């Protein structure tokens, strides 16, 4: 994690590594974000690993970019409440792709990565027409996937100087 620990009291902002500064500049140029992001979470998924259905919550502005690296897998988008298990669509996140979601998807939906070894590239995949791969049907999760979740923490506070 880079940027600090988000909390309701405010995040004591830590300086981002310089390569993330370059990425921030690029994302502004490409109009993904209007201002510099201040928080990046790195996640690693071995084939078969996932992340429970969740929402990213109120500590961040409702606008997130997810950079996928090394390997592809499927993200599922659910309607709230999760108890109804109503899946709306899936998104196949290929390496070197950037997923941006905001407002409604951020606030009204949940996202998850199911714990499985294969993903089904069928008509339920909302970005099927945008994919680099032409493979369809069951596709193996082949390698470790690394993702960067890039966000803007709303509330910042001054770091307490070391005593
Ligand atoms: O790794 C991903 O693509 C999703 C990560 C995520 O949902 C999160 O960090 O909140
Ligand atoms: Fe998330």
Image: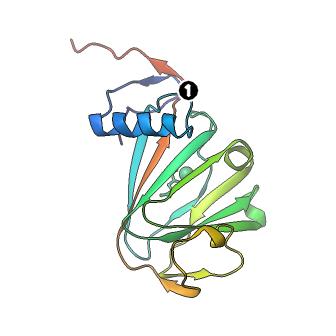
Answer yes or no: is residue 86 visible.
yes
Q: Quadrant of residue 61?
A: top right
Q: Quadrant of residue 44?
A: bottom left
Residue at the outermost left position: 163
Which quadrant is home to the C terminus?
A: top left
Q: Quadrant of residue 52?
A: bottom right
Q: Nearer the viewer, residue 112 or 29?
A: 29
Q: Residue at x 51, y 30 (%)?
A: 153
Residue 27 point in image, percent of width and height: 48, 39
Q: Nearer the viewer, residue 6 or 143?
A: 143
Q: Secondary structure at mark 1?
A: loop
Left or right, residue 106 beside residue 146: right
Q: Is residue 30 above or below residue 140?
A: above
Residue corresponding to mark 1: 154
Left or right, residue 97 beside residue 91: left
Q: Nearer the viewer, residue 34 or 118?
A: 34
Residue 34 point in image, percent of width and height: 57, 30
Answer yes or no: is residue 85 visible.
no
Q: Residue at x 69, y 68 (%)?
A: 126
Residue 136 point in image, percent of width and height: 59, 86
């Amino acid at each position: 994690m880079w940027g600090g620990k988000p909390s309701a009291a405010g995040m004591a902002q830590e300086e981002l590594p310089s390569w993330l500064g370059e990425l921030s500049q690029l994302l502004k140029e490409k109009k993904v974000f209007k201002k510099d992001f201040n928080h990046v979470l790195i996640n690693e998924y071995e084939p078969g690993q996932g992340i429970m259905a969740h929402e990213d919550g109120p500590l961040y502005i409702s606008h997130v970019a997810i950079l996928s690296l090394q390997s592809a897998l499927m993200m599922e988008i659910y309607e709230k409440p999760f108890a109804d298990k109503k899946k709306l669509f899936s998104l196949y996140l290929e390496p070197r792709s950037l997923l941006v979601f905001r407002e409604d998807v951020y606030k009204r939906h949940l996202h998850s990565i199911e714990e499985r070894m294969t993903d089904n590239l069928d008509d339920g995949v909302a970005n099927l027409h945008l994919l680099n791969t032409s493979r369809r049907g069951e596709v193996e999760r082949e390698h470790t996937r690394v993702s960067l979740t890039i966000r803007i923490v709303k509330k910042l506070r001054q770091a307490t100087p070391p005593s």
